Amino acid sequence: MPGNEVFPTWIASQRLPFDNEDIDTTVFDAKFYPYETEDNDQIVAVVAADTVVVLRPTQGADRPFDILCWFQDEQTPQACYNSLCWTKHPSTRNPILCIAGSEPKHIKILDIESGRPIRTIAGHGREINDLAVSPVCTNLIASASNDNTIRLWNIGEEYQQQPCVALFAGGGHKAPVLAIRFHPNGRWLLSGGIDTAVCLWAIPSDAELDQGTENSPYRATKIVHYPHFFSTEVHPNYVDCLAFYGDLIISKAARADDIKDNEIQIWKIDGFNSEAEVPEEPPIPVPGNQTRSSFPHDSRFRGFQRLLTLDIPNTSRFYHRFGLLHAPGMRPILAMGNEQSAYSFWDLQRLDEGIDPKERPKPKKTAGRGKANVLKESLTVLPSSDGARDGARSSTRMRLPIPHDFEADFLPS
């Protein structure tokens, strides 16, 4: 059983000095700079309401971080940003930050060195809920919106006049799209939404994205009507966070208003191979069919298998997200915090290594009223196919160790 050296160690915490300290400011998104830096510094950006802060964590200093950039949108009344993604400037290759949210309803691109906006990209008709950058092309940015669509943008200089290169809409989500994530090979895009649907979209090829029209010098926006996989059966409620783990999928759903316990599912699409040729035709919707897939699978089942369910108590109904660290040479770690400042971490490599029955920990006692709860549940695989929920297949039942967790109070230092 892995020791504590596998998991992160708590170092320090400190409140960010927002203008009005008497009002709680929710931090909606935080992301580390994913590319190499000259000094191998770890740089992180956070977004909260009308403010974006870029930080550099420090060790052994009086403050746990240095503030490198502080951007506050003073031009947009009631500005509320909820999403960000890092990328590089198309020509200078300097770090830039894309931010978006419920107001304004467009993507703003910030130059980190100057702390000023350098470009605005408009196109969505309603609020933007998530942003993602392609792992293979730093010019490609995807956005998910309350207008039920996903847009793919190219921020290259040659796309100044028409940056929207693809629109994913029509036969997919029928309600606001809450979360998107690229596959590491850049060929696929996952999405989840308020309609409880999870969609897997094929990213058009470079040739398809670069098509022009006969009578115009501008490139035409590629319309992708149907995803290659669609299901409203994986989760019973809003899907507001998801990620690829290899070709497996990790996704989280909110629960009903009177239930505080969310869940994370680890599952797979039958027949999906991210490196194989994209199926020529995506499946067409059929009335009454809640799952459709263009990948080869047993027709007796719905085309996906739930593998593990992770219980995550004391998490809010909406927009509460997990994080996945999956880097070469490191054990993959899944992490999520809850409303009581408790963080839980799962060592996903244990899924492949298995567990000696003698190492199974005994269940912990439930925390008393008023105390911060930590996770008590083990990772549990759902029953085999004869007892599978909603006709989806599940693998053999097994149990893994409870997650490593700790508590932290976010108080000013």
Image: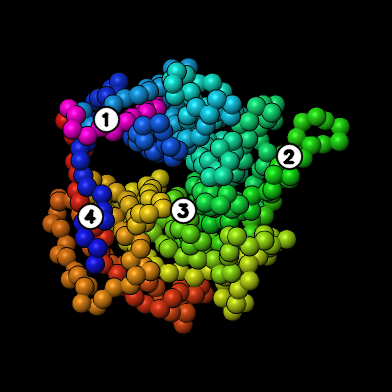
Q: Are marks 1 and 4 in contact (CB under 8 Å)?
A: no
The residue positioned 40% from the left and 22% from the top of the image is 71
Mark 3 vs mark 1, CA separation in Å: 28 Å
Identify the residue position indicated by label 2 in the image: 210
On-image quarter of the N terminus: bottom left
Q: Is residue 171 visible?
A: yes
Q: CA distance from mark 3 to mark 2?
A: 28 Å
Q: Earlier in the sequence, mark 1 or mark 4?
A: 4
Question: Element under label 1?
Answer: strand
Q: Residue at x 20, y 37 (%)?
A: 12
Q: Residue furthest front?
A: 38
Select label 3 or label 2 by which is in front: 2
Q: Residue at x 39, y 38 (%)?
A: 32
Q: Given the current orientation, which residue lies at the most extreme left position? A: 368
The Cα–Cα distance between marks 2 and 4, rounded to whole angstroms, is 48 Å
Q: Amino acid at mark 3?
A: Ala
Residue at which label 1 appears: 65
* Rendering coords of residue 95 (x, y %): 47, 29
Q: Which residue extends farthest right?
A: 215
**Answer yes or no: do the residues labelled 3 and 2 have beta carbons within 8 Å?**
no
Q: Nearer the viewer, residue 92 or 173?
A: 92
Using the image, tell me which numbered label, if any, was put on residue 5: 4
Q: Nearer the viewer, residue 243 or 372?
A: 243
Can you give x and y, in whole percent of width and height, for residue 346 in the image?
31, 59
Q: Earlier in the sequence, mark 3 or mark 2?
A: 2
The residue shown at (43%, 69%) is 307
Q: What amino acid type is highlighted by mark number 2?
A: Asp
127 horizontally vs 367: left or right: right
Q: Earlier in the sequence, mark 2 or mark 1?
A: 1
